[in-house]
């Protein structure tokens, strides 16, 4: 998909947030990894998804903190939205963050920037996830979504 404006992107992200809500009725846990070069829009996409899921506060990029957790109520249950940024951490050190245990917990939504660093672990352990690849082409964004 190619988005030519922020308005088009926001419309798509609202639809994606609704799909996430629907999926969580069955699964109770969801992992979405975001891949793309620096400045592609990963943080912007995650902020918009969080807003559409009902997070009232403005998400801050966790580039230096690595992991931000936001409580939210979805489908009459208490969830945690985990916004993780793996840019500044090596693939080898990622799972030392206690992420391995957390990825298995129910009532969690993981929105992970630079998620390609975690992808081999997810595949190897047969953990289902959604991969969103964002590519900036001039003023446009090309977005590909895969369910794995």
Image (cartoon, rainbow, N blue to C red):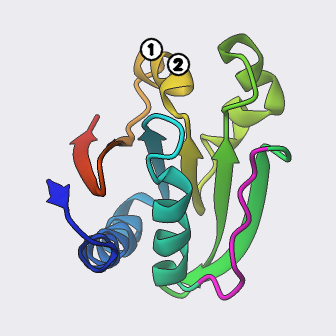
Return the x and y of residue 48 as percentages of the image width and height.
Answer: 48, 73
Give the farthest residue toward the left: 1
Answer yes or no: do the residues labelled 1 and 2 have beta carbons within 8 Å?
Answer: yes
Residue shown at the point (57%, 52%) measured from the top left: 110
The part of the chain drawn in magenta is: 55-63
Residue shown at the point (53%, 18%) measured from the top left: 121
82 displayed left or right of 64 = left
Residue 114, by quadrant, is top right
45 displayed left or right of 1 = right
Which residue occupies the foreground of this view, 90 or 100? 90
Residue identifier under label 2: 121
What quarter of the picture does the C terminus occupy? Answer: top left
Return the x and y of residue 115 as percentages of the image width and height.
Answer: 52, 34
Residue identifier under label 1: 124
Return the x and y of residue 21 as percentages of the image width and height.
Answer: 39, 74
Crowd class of label 1 (few under 14; some 14 to 19; many from 20; radius 10 Å): few
Residue 70, by quadrant, is bottom right
Element type at marker 1?
helix
Which residue occupies the foreground of this view, 89 or 96? 89
Crowd class of label 2 (few under 14; some 14 to 19; many from 20; radius 10 Å): some
């Amino acid at each position: 998909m190619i988005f030519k404006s922020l308005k088009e992107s926001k419309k798509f992200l609202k639809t994606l947030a609704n799909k996430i809500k629907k999926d969580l009725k069955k699964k109770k846990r969801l992992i979405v990894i975001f891949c793309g070069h620096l400045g592609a829009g990963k943080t912007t996409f995650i902020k918009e998804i969080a807003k559409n899921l009902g997070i009232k506060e403005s998400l801050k990029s966790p580039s230096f903190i690595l992991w931000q957790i936001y409580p939210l109520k979805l489908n009459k249950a208490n969830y945690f939205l985990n916004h993780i940024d793996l840019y500044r951490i090596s693939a080898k050190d990622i799972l030392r963050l206690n992420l391995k245990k957390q990825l298995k917990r129910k009532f969690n939504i993981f929105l992970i920037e630079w998620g390609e660093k975690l992808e081999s672990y997810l595949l190897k352990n047969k953990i289902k996830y959604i991969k969103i690849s964002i590519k900036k082409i001039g003023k446009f964004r090309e977005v590909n979504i895969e369910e794995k």
